[in-house]
Image: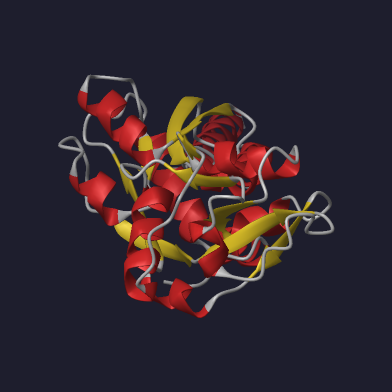
């Protein structure tokens, strides 16, 4: 009797141990587990072009909702400025540039992936008080004009379209990034600016957009990459994967970005 009781007890212990081993299977890295928690943790520092401010802010919130243990920090600026910061040792995990040229300048990058395209559009204040009709108005010295500085992607694209149109622009101000140029328009400080169509959409309550044919000569491709010295490499990869996912694409498309 005693031997049968002891054997049963040992069998129960063995069964319990096997059940415990089965529950220790880890969730895949970067994905929520069956209990709804994520294996990711810590902070992810994302350096992104100024024209990505609205979409990436939304993607960051969505990503944090999927991964409650993660905080996504953003540094939005001109792509050229961000590239310089990264090369000087800024603690970045991900870089999303508004032009391949600036991505190419970063020495500490993995393999970039082009994830969206963007096109220039003329932005004017609501009601178009300056009576802007097209690109030729940017040569009129009586108009107040804002452009991006030539070293930043939106400024380099502007130079291409003016060259394609055979025009010489007469800007009153050169801004450090596309958001600064857009602000000039939304505050009615200039008659017009050249910004991306996504920026016009983001400020549609304050500005109006005017399309022009030469814009097709300067379509900007946006690359994204993890950085090889990323402080949070797992988080960096997971965030890039999220941007490239169907959910990420949906947010970007809704904002007016085109597929690469």
Residue 137's place in the image compared with 171, above or below, is below
Q: Quadrant of residue 214?
A: bottom left
The image shows a total of numbered marks equal to 0
Q: Nearer the viewer, residue 5 or 65?
A: 65
Q: Position of residue 254 (x, y in %)?
A: 68, 65
Q: Nearer the viewer, residue 34 or 100?
A: 100
Look at 70% across and 55% down and name the residue there.
124
Look at 66% across and 70% down and name the residue there.
133
Residue at the far bottom in the pictured view: 213
Residue 177's place in the image compared with 246, above or below, is above
- Is residue 255 at all visible to an observer of this figure? yes
Q: Quadrant of residue 80?
A: top left
Look at 63% across and 36% down and name the residue there.
64
Q: Nearer the viewer, residue 201 or 68?
A: 201
Which quadrant is home to the C terminus?
bottom left
Q: Position of residue 160 (x, y in %)?
A: 33, 64
Residue at the far left in the pictured view: 107
Q: Quadrant of residue 105?
A: top left
- Is residue 36 at all visible to an observer of this figure? no
- Here the colouring is secondary structure
Is residue 100 left or right of 17 when viewed as pictured?
A: left
Which quadrant is home to the N terminus?
top right
Is residue 22 left or right of 219 when viewed as pictured?
A: right
Q: Nearer the viewer, residue 62 or 104?
A: 104
Q: Position of residue 92 (x, y in %)?
A: 35, 27
Q: Position of residue 3 (x, y in %)?
A: 53, 31
Look at 37% across and 38% down and name the residue there.
94
């Amino acid at each position: 009797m005693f031997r049968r009781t002891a054997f049963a007890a040992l069998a129960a212990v063995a069964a319990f141990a096997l059940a415990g081993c089965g529950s220790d299977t880890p969730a895949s890295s970067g994905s929520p587990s069956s209990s709804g928690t994520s294996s990711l943790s810590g902070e992810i520092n994302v350096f992104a072009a100024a024209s990505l401010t609205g979409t990436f802010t939304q993607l960051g919130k969505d990503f944090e909702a999927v991964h409650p243990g993660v905080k996504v920090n953003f540094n939005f600026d001109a792509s050229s400025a961000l590239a310089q910061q990264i090369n000087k040792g800024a603690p970045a995990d991900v870089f999303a540039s508004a032009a391949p040229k600036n991505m190419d300048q970063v020495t500490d990058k993995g393999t970039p992936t082009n994830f969206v395209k963007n096109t220039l559009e003329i932005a004017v204040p609501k009601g178009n008080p300056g009576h802007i009709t097209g690109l030729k108005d940017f040569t009129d010295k009586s108009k107040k004009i804002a452009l991006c500085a030539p070293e930043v992607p939106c400024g380099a694209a502007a130079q291409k379209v003016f060259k394609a149109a055979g025009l010489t622009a007469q800007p009153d101000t050169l801004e450090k990034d596309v958001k600064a140029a857009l602000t000039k328009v939304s505050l009615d400080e200039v008659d017009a600016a050249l910004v991306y169509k996504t920026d016009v959409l983001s400020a549609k309550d304050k500005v109006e957009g005017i399309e022009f044919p030469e814009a097709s000569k300067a379509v900007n491709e946006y690359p994204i990459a993890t950085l090889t010295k990323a402080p949070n490499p797992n988080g960096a990869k997971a965030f890039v994967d999220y941007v490239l996912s169907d959910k990420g694409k949906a947010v970007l498309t809704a904002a007016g970005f085109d597929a690469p």
